[in-house]
Amino acid sequence: MTSTIQAPPVAPGAPASRAAGGAGRRPSRITRLRPWLLFAPALIVLAVLLLWPLVRVVLFSLQDYGLREIVSGEPNWIGLDNYAEILADPSLWGVVLPNTVVFAVLSVAGTVAFGTAVAVLMASLGPFWRTIVGSAIMVAWAMPAVTGTYVWVWIFDADRGVFNQALQALGLQDDPVNWFTNRYSFFAIVLLNVIHHGFPFVAVTVLAGLLGVSKEMLEAAEMDGAGPFRRFFQVIVPNLRQVFTVVIILSTIWDFKVFAQVYLMPGGSGSNREVLNLGVWSYVESFGQNRYGFGSAIAVLLTLVLLAITVVYVRTMLKEEEL
Amino acid sequence: MLVVLLLAFTLFPVLWMLSSAFDAKAGIGAASILPREWSLENFRYVLTEGGFDVFLRNSAIVALVTVLASAVLALLASVAVARFRFKLRTALLLMVLVVQMVPLEALVIPLFVQVRDLGLLNTLLGLMVVYVALSLPFGIWMLRGFVAAVPVELEEAAYIDGASWGRMFRSVLLPLVMPGLVATSVFSFITAWNEFIFAMTLLGGATENYTVAIGLKQFFGEHSNEWGAIMAASTIITLPVMVFFVIVQRRLSSGLVAGAVKG
């Protein structure tokens, strides 16, 4: 910041005067400092609570950081041993990574497809039904992840859950089944939960985009003989490319790191190692086993995956507009 | 028909939660769609014996402070990036975007150590500080679109009329970005109200400081879960969020699109 103060008086860092020929005000020192003064409080918070911890988690990942190190504060460097151990762990390749990646792909596809279908449906409804459906999906959206997860757990509860009771009443099964012990049915429930919670964002965002697509273009396409499918894929989708990019990438980022939805389900907090994903594995190793260094290394791997996705996001944004 | 199916899927979990919450016999005997015995007993139980009144108060304090602090910080920062061209501006914006993508699991380990070193473990203050940081990037990113959308001509007209910068901020900029502020405040409220992993980690040792999101744990037993109580407590947690969503429904969607797409 000091360098900003000492910059020459006619530095080109002056306020953006976008009005044509608006060269009226001379940039004074205070004007040049102003953006920094405005940004400083947020910058301090972000630096201390997000950036420095990010650096620290990388440092922890290179240490055997356990209870002893937490108390003494003495670093115990072990280089890349934590990473070597993770990569050599067969459960990473057989369980954790598939649970994380396959789940994310399925839930993103499910959320975006379902959300888009709902948006298209809503766009075709009259104002009355659109308001009804809109309010209903707001209700689904508003349900916190924690309570939403508990409701799904309750619905699929082994002993008293309505799902088991309905299946028995229909004669489809004789005894209640514990759906949480099997890895696939466990994640099917998580998938249901995540789609239910995530599709409203997609529906609302895509609907807003749909309503912005010019009527003339759609009518012109219809006159040219394009059916509803062609109109959707050749007029609407290209027009909403940016909207879709945003919802797909945001959903990807959210679905890669589902935590509460897994952690709060029976066996999800580490007792059933078949259902671990990267996030829960990191947490369980850190706070369950006091292996903070090992947990940090897992967290760093998860972060790298997400950063790669973010880079794609940023590049798309940069292509579309000037930051 | 499609609409009915959609409504059924969307609303079923919510209705099931409500029905169990109002059923004195939830979790006993066969399930039924409507409560077999309508009663407020579950609510009375969680609020008086379950300690939920305290959790509600804790969450309200944490959420209020988080909303106010992050709204002020995000607004100032978004004006800086939307209205001024300065060195490192793009770098700051990218940093804001990138930290938003960082998974909480990666932050929870170092922040646990950091909050512990500050002596703030098991305190509400420690949690609030973390929540302000968590809601800032989104707030800045979203508000920047709203600030940029305010025509510079309006500001310049205010200057020409002799208004100071601070005066212009209050009477020109602030009213026009209010919808954005509302939307970001809703998001930071929801972050603070719903957040689970930090609350669990940073408040783990102090039941009296639990927020609602982790207070639910109280009703899970070794062998059986008090589902009526859990659903009543879930209803209490969900209500404020739903009220917020309904109030800002319109602004929320336009804000989302403006913030996310138009940037």
Image: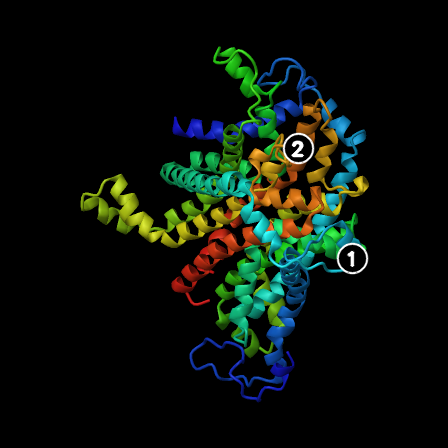
Classify mark 1: helix, strand or loop: helix
* Mark number, residue A223: none
Q: Amino acid at mark 2?
A: Ser
Location of residue A36 (image quadrant): bottom right
Q: Using the image, name the chain to which the residue with label 1 belongs.
A: B
A278 above or below A179? below
| Horizontal arrangement in the rendering, residue A195 relative to residue B242 (left or right) | left
Q: Amino acid at mark 1?
A: Asp
Foreground residue among A259 and A113: A259
B258 above or below A321? above
> According to the image, label 2 marks what residue?
B234
Q: Residue A139: percent from the left, percent from the top?
A: 55, 36
Q: Residue A10: percent from the left, percent from the top?
A: 54, 88
In the orientation shown, which residue stands out farthest toward the left? A224
Label 1: how many Cα within 10 Å (few below 14, some 14–19, many 20+): few
A281 above or below A184? below
> According to the image, label 1 marks what residue?
B117
